[in-house]
Image: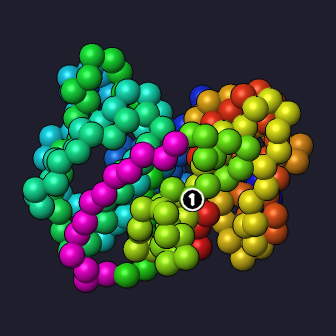
Amino acid sequence: MIELRPFAKLGGENHGWLDAKHHFSFAGYHDPARMNWGNLRVWNDDAIAPHSGFPPHPHRDMEIVTYILEGAISHQDSLGNAGRTEAGDVQVMSAGTGIRHSEFNVEDVTTRLFQIWIMPTRSGEAPGWGTRPFPKGERAGRFVTLASGYAEDEDALPIRTDARVVAATLKAGETAEYPLGKDRKAYLVPAKGAIRIDDVKVNARDGAAIADIDVLRVTAIEDSEIVMVDAA
């Protein structure tokens, strides 16, 4: 089962400094049919204007993964963490028992990012934050794990949930496989390019909600960058 969610039909709002599109119900956009996909709760496609951003605000009990498409984001939080995450890289914030943070685009260009929220399967733990670069060469032609709730994914950023965030870069004509399993759900968004899953074409920034597929096969129609959540 593959449900295509075209970018042009996503909910969202343009706040001037923030142009946000929502794959799932979020803020002022509500769709009872799009509350979550498994334990994936939020997938926002955000464009943040230069020298603007989200002022300090609180979270708890949520795993928040940020994938940078263009530009960079600068993070500060109530634990004293501070860092800058650039295009192609990932940061993870485990809100745990509670954390306040700000996310600002201090660059001279617009920052575009995916913000992904996954509901945790462990609670009552201290909050945490981390970021790391993921060289694009490592994900050329195949899926690599960027964030994971599984101990065997030693090179991935840890999240406290039954899920993985994976990515791949494919040249036109290339195919990558991912062993999803029929008891799992996946949500896939091409950051760039266009891909095909079976007979379904998924363009840049469209969403594809995927279920009941044992091995997922993705073929690039043009050079593509793909981000996907493997959810419980």
Specify the amino acid type for callout 1: Thr
Q: Residue at x 37, y 64 (%)?
A: 63
Q: Position of residue 110 (x, y in %)?
A: 35, 21
The quadrant the C terminus occupies is: bottom right
Q: Where 83 falls versus 60 (above or below)?
A: above
Which region is colored magenta? Answer: 123-135
Is residue 39 shown to the viewer in this render?
no
Q: Identify the element where label 1 is drawn.
A: strand
* In magenta stretch: residue 124: yes
The residue that appears at 17% across and 48% down in the rendered structure is 82
Q: Is residue 124 visible?
A: yes
What residue is pinned by disc 1?
145
Q: Main secondary structure of the magenta part?
A: loop
Residue closer to the observer: 163 or 27: 163
Where 113 falls versus 31 (above or below)?
above
Which quadrant does the N terminus fall into?
bottom right
- Mark 1: few, some, or many residues within 10 Å (few <14, many ≥20)? many
- Residue 152, compared with residue 169, is above or below; it is below
Identity of the residue drawn at 31% across and 65% down: 94
Judge by depth and name the residue closer to the eye, 41 or 162.
162
Q: Is residue 2 magenta?
A: no
Quadrant of res 74? top left
Image spot of residue 223 (x, y percent): 72, 28
